[in-house]
Amino acid sequence: MKKAKKIIAVLSLVIGLFAFSFGAFANNEEIIDNPHVSRFTVYQQDNKYTYLAGEQILFHTGISTVDNAETLTGSWLEIRVPRLNIVDDSFVASDLSAGSQISKTVTREGTATDGYFVVRYELQPIAGGVSIDVPIRFTTVTATPDNFQIPVTASFVDKDQQKLINDTSVTFTIKTIKPTVTKMVGTFTSASLTSTAGSWSQLHNQLIQHVGYVQEDNPNFLSED
């Protein structure tokens, strides 16, 4: 009986280890550490990762190699940005510095709601002690929902699309300013409500909504008309 329990315990341990290994493989949890790459990151120069809807976002992707690294050949840099709530023609990916890239392509995968902007750079051979930083900018639509998130992911791969190091990513959060309503009582003529020259609405960037007239016997209240 004791022997049977031991066999069951061993089998359970083996199955558990197999399940753990399979789960790690299935979830791509393998850590790829490249001794020749000292830096691979997506970042915003001012550490600003929260923006207002309709505001332009500028970020960089950076790669650095260690001083004594072997020259990397046949490498590619790929950057992916979701298209949802981004003004399509505002997306601009800069070229790399002279002598750093062989080619650059910017494609729009999928639709505007579930697709991605994909930027791919075919890189020149990268020697040791070299740093490459490329800026990309885009603007969100003004109707972007509050707390909307935009995850940006970068991959550094070889000619066979095998990762040279783990992907790097960053997330931008979009905020909206909630409108406020201020009540006021004033005397306006039809001309002042419709005029575009020097009107109260133009000077104070406000929207005037006609909601009635002041009660004659109580100037603090509006009439029901």
Image (tube, helix red, strand yellow):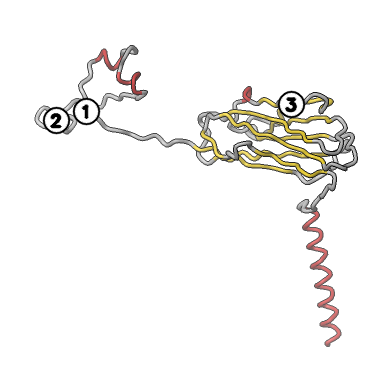
Question: Secondary structure beneath disc 3?
Answer: strand
Q: Amino acid at mark 2?
A: Pro
Asked if marks 1 and 2 touch (Cβ < 8 Å), the reply is yes
Distance of label 3 from label 2 (alpha carbons): 63 Å
- Return the residue at label 3: 106
Q: Which residue is mark 1?
A: 185
Query: Is residue 81 placed above or below 167 in the rendered structure?
Result: above
Residue 48 disc label? none
Give the residue at x 73% y 35%: 79
Q: Mark 1 falls on what kind of element?
A: loop
Residue at position x 53%, y 41% in the image: 147
Q: Name the disc covering residue 219, or none.
A: 2
Question: Could you tell which of marks 3 and 1 lies nearer the N-terminus?
Answer: 3
Which class describes the residues within 10 Å of circle 1: few (<14), some (14-19), or many (20+)? few
Instruction: Report the quarter where the N terminus lies.
Output: bottom right
Determine which quarter of the picture holds residue 148. Answer: top right
Of residues 70 and 221, the one drawn nearer to the viewer in this rendering: 70
